[in-house]
């Protein structure tokens, strides 16, 4: 040790330490170490070491070479005492044997009941549980698990098919809170005993879903383990794999896939398997399963799909109903595309037939269907009956309920099966007076203009309409068709597949104002810009070349008439619905910009034509009436867009349904305010002087646009005031294949145009809907963009004010019977680039809608004519086949 750290020697026999040692007595609690504690010879024999200078009690000298040595001696003594199981005295206590000068070691005390960390072990050994501890914990866990299972088994109740059959109605309310209708499955549910269920039905579900039903215990442990593991990982949930488990699941109102519910389902399934025999379980399963169309139980399904009692079902029919248990949305041959666009009648029929044949084959293979019965059953697919109206589902109520139900399912976690069990209260946005007024307007115009009993071309005419509140999105009224009671189950207000024609042109104009053209360097185009409005014109690409037909001949865009308009302003072209200026304008602006503006206004991607060819500018897309009303509401609200909605609240047995998100959207500024106001200004002129002249009898400030498609297969009018935006569509449809039919000759006239019957319906409805309401007009539009005339236009361009003209235009609109239809998808679009194999023509049209080889020979809506729908393979729907999707409204699904 270095010198500067060594302490100076203590004085011999003196100093404060010696004094303290000398003064310590029995009461001090400090005693000298006993002889022998240090192990030195002096300690052993009582003689001090020479020079020790230390005197112990009783006068004995004690020698410690240093304090370190004393500490080491004390530690040795401490370890010796521990080994001898002796306890040294604590500070202030009596001296124990081996007491040394160093720090004392505390007493070990008693062992704990659970010896962990382990007593008497050092290092990592202290943390290794003993076999006693491990065995005790394992036995405790097993015992606790057994106790938990026993308690769970004792506490759960077995399901009752009779209780499950006590379904409730769903109650719908008008916007004012009064009750609209109470409808549900209560009258479409009836339990039957096993003897009333054909053996073929029993065997069909066993062969298809649970072949070991008669041998298993009712629970599939591996299936449950997979489901639990999947849920724990956050993966897709799985249902019970045995009929017993599915029966248990059917009795729950809540179908939540949670770990707690899975354990409970397992306990109940075990209890059911122990308490019920197999026939009782099978009976319960078939009586509580959902077969679609609101039918719960085999008896209701037999009545719904085949109009007979369950015990009268044939083996072939049983196989069809058994197929429905895999999912009625996708296996009901009538289709359910209102819930999923892939569930079309055609796709569902194919899926149903395939599973029907497979189930019969499995029954035969399992020896549950004889050779003769199998051959008889497989011979012909037993097509189920069509849909039928259920309780309360008549008139427009059926379509209001349909729209509200789809909205709830799309904006919550509620399944259709849960919803159809009832108990929900649905508060809608529908205004009873407006709904009745819209239905009355359609009825009156139908009665006045159509006579299907005496004119064949008046048959199969249908209407769809919707009315939306601008800057809010609230759907206040709609018209979906003739009613479920008349066999019309498609909601015409909320389906896609009917091309909108020239009602699309305002989106082209808005895109031009926003983006300009390829030659304007981003500068917006003024609606006073002039384009060539003559008939039969080539359409030029930005590089100066022109579009070609499939045979490389020039493609010509046509108007309905051959009127020589010359270079006219876009405002005038909109007024008279001339096609050629808007087709060329759309190409100059870029169809992607047109699409983007339409989307921002509220049109869904799914309903827009995927071919952004020239015809896209004049209406190849097929949005629903609801979405068209909502998009025009964006113009009415000076560019503010709000998605349409039909439900404000959903309650379950009086309490808010937790998974339904109150949807009222905050309006967003989707378009520049002045762009929207300029579009409105131009569309006001359509009513004042153009193809929408019949709407002028409304007697208040309004804006709108007419539209008709090729071969006169559909006609539209979409218009608005600042308070209400409404769209009306009219079309003919083959009820068997849903193909659109021409309306040439309908109502006793050559053709039906958007400015005719649809405008009459719109005007009568809006007059009633806005009765006693004020007329705020529209915000004034200010001059926008630059005048950018098409190449070849006369110069200079005269200056014209933007205010809507209140005087007849230079070229008056045609008479009602000649009011121009809105162009629909043009065949030119696909033919010009060789996209459509059906195009074989030479591109020459005659200006009257008659072309050769499918080339677009359309015209204008009003003063110009119609544009034929192109035969393109990727248009929404199937060309002229109307889709049955839920498209326009909440999901954009199309048929």
Image: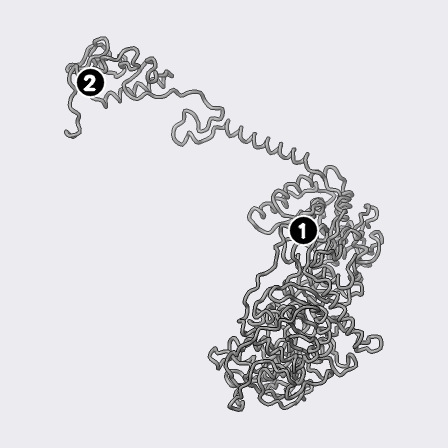
Q: Secondary structure at mark 2?
A: helix
Could you say which quadrant of the image residue 462 lies in? bottom right
x and y percent of residue 383 in the render? 79, 62
Q: Quadrant of the N terminus?
A: top left
Name the residue carrying label 2: 16
Q: Is residue 532 left or right of residue 318?
A: left
Q: Is residue 852 left or right of residue 793?
A: right
Question: Which of 650/408 is in front?
Answer: 650
Count of numbered circles on the image: 2
Q: Position of residue 670 (x, y in %)?
A: 55, 68
Q: Which residue is mark 1?
A: 651
Q: Quadrant of the C terminus?
A: bottom right
Residue with the most extreme top position = 58
Q: Quadrant of residue 446?
A: bottom right
Rendering coords of residue 873 (x, y %): 64, 74
Q: In the image, residue 539 lies at what x, y percent?
A: 57, 85
Q: Are marks 1 and 2 in contact (CB under 8 Å)?
A: no
* Residue 714 visible somewhere in the drawing: no
* Residue closer to the observer: 863 or 156: 863
Quarter assignment of residue 120: top left
CA gap, disc 1 and disc 2: 90 Å
Q: Earlier in the sequence, mark 1 or mark 2?
A: 2
């Amino acid at each position: 040790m270095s010198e500067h750290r060594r302490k100076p020697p203590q004085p011999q026999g003196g100093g404060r330490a010696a004094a303290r040692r000398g003064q310590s007595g029995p009461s001090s609690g400090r005693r000298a170490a006993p002889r022998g504690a240090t192990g030195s010879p002096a300690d052993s024999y009582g003689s001090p070491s020479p020079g020790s200078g230390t005197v112990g009690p009783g006068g004995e000298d004690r020698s410690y070479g240093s304090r370190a040595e004393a500490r080491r001696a004390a530690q040795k003594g401490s370890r010796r005492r521990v080994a001898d199981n002796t306890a040294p005295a604590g500070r202030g206590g009596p001296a124990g044997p081996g007491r040394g000068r160093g720090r004392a070691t505390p007493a070990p005390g008693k062992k704990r009941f659970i010896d962990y960390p382990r007593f008497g072990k050092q290092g990592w050994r202290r943390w290794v549980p003993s076999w006693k501890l491990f065995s005790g914990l394992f036995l405790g866990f097993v015992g606790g698990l057994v106790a938990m299972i026993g308690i769970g088994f004792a506490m759960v109740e077995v399901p009752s098919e009779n209780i499950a059959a006590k379904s409730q109605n769903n109650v719908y309310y008008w916007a004012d809170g009064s009750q609209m209708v109470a409808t549900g499955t209560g009258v479409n549910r009836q339990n039957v005993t096993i003897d009333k269920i054909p053996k073929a039905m029993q065997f069909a579900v066993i062969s298809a879903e649970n072949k070991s039903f008669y041998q298993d215990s009712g629970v599939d442990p591996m299936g449950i383990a997979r489901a639990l593991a999947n849920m724990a990982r956050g993966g897709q949930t799985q249902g019970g794999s045995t009929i017993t488990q599915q029966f248990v699941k059917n009795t729950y109102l809540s179908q939540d896939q949670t770990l707690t519910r899975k354990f409970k389902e397992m306990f109940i399934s075990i209890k059911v398997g122990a308490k019920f025999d197999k026939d009782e379980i099978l009976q319960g399963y078939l009586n509580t399963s959902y077969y679609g169309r609101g039918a719960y139980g085999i008896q209701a399904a037999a009545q719904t799909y085949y109009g007979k009692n369950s015990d009268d079902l044939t083996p072939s029919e049983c196989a069809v109903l058994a197929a429905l248990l895999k999912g009625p949305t996708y296996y009901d041959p009538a289709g359910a595309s209102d819930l999923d666009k892939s569930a079309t009648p055609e796709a569902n029929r194919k899926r149903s037939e395939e599973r029907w044949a497979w189930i019969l084959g499995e029954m035969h293979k399992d020896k549950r269907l004889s050779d003769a019965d199998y051959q008889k059953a497989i011979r012909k697919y037993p097509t189920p009956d069509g849909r039928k109206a259920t309780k309360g589902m008549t008139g427009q109520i059926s379509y209001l309920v349909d729209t509200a139900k789809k909205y709830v399912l799309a904006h919550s976690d509620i399944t259709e099966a849960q919803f159809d069990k009832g108990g929900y209260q649905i508060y809608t946005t529908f205004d009873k007076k407006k709904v009745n007024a819209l239905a009355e307007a359609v009825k009156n115009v139908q009665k006045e203009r159509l006579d299907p009993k005496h004119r064949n071309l008046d048959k199969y005419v249908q209407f769809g309409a919707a009315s939306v509140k601008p800057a809010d999105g609230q759907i206040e009224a709609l018209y979906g068709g003739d009613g479920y009671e008349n066999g019309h189950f498609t909601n015409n207000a909320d389906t896609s597949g009917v091309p909108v024609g020239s009602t699309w042109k305002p989106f082209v104009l808005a895109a031009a104002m926003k983006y300009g053209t390829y030659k304007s360097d981003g500068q917006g185009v003024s609606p006073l810009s002039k384009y060539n409005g003559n008939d039969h014109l080539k359409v030029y690409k930005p590089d100066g070349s022109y579009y070609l037909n499939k045979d490389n001949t020039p493609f010509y865009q046509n108007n309905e008439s051959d009127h020589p308009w010359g270079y006219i302003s876009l405002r005038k072209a909109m007024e008279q619905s001339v096609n050629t200026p808007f087709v060329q304008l759309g190409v100059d602006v870029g169809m992607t910009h047109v699409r983007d503006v339409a989307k921002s206004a509220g049109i869904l991607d799914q309903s827009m034509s995927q071919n952004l060819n020239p015809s896209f500018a004049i209406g190849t897309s097929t949005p629903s009436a609801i979405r068209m009303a909502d998009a025009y509401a964006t113009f009415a609200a000076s560019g503010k867009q709000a998605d349409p909605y039909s439900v404000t609240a959903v309650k379950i047995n009086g309490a808010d349904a937790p998974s339904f998100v109150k949807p009222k959207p905050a309006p967003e500024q989707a378009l520049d305010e002045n762009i929207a106001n300029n579009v409105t200004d131009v569309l006001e002129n359509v009513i004042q002087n153009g193809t929408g002249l019949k709407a002028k009898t409304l007697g208040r400030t309004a804006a709108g646009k007419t539209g008709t498609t090729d071969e006169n297969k559909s006609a539209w009018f979409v218009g608005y005031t600042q308070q209400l935006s409404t769209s009306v569509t009219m079309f003919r449809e083959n009820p068997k294949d849903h193909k659109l039919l021409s309306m040439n000759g309908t109502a006793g006239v050559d053709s039906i145009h958007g400015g005719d019957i649809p405008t009459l319906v719109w005007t009568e409805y809006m007059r009633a809907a806005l009765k006693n309401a004020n007329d705020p007009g529209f915000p004034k539009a200010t001059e926008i963009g630059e005048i950018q005339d098409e190449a070849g236009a006369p110069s200079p361009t005269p200056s014209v004010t933007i205010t809507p003209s209140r005087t007849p235009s230079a070229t008056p609109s045609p008479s009602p019977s000649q009011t121009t239809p809105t162009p629909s998808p043009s065949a030119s679009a696909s033919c010009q680039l060789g996209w459509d194999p059906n195009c074989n023509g030479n591109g020459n049209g005659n200006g009257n809608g008659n072309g050769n080889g499918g080339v677009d020979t359309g015209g204008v809506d009003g003063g110009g004519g119609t544009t034929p729908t192109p035969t393109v393979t990727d248009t929404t729907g199937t060309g002229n086949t109307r889709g049955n999707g839920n498209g326009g409204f909440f999901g954009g699904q199309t048929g």
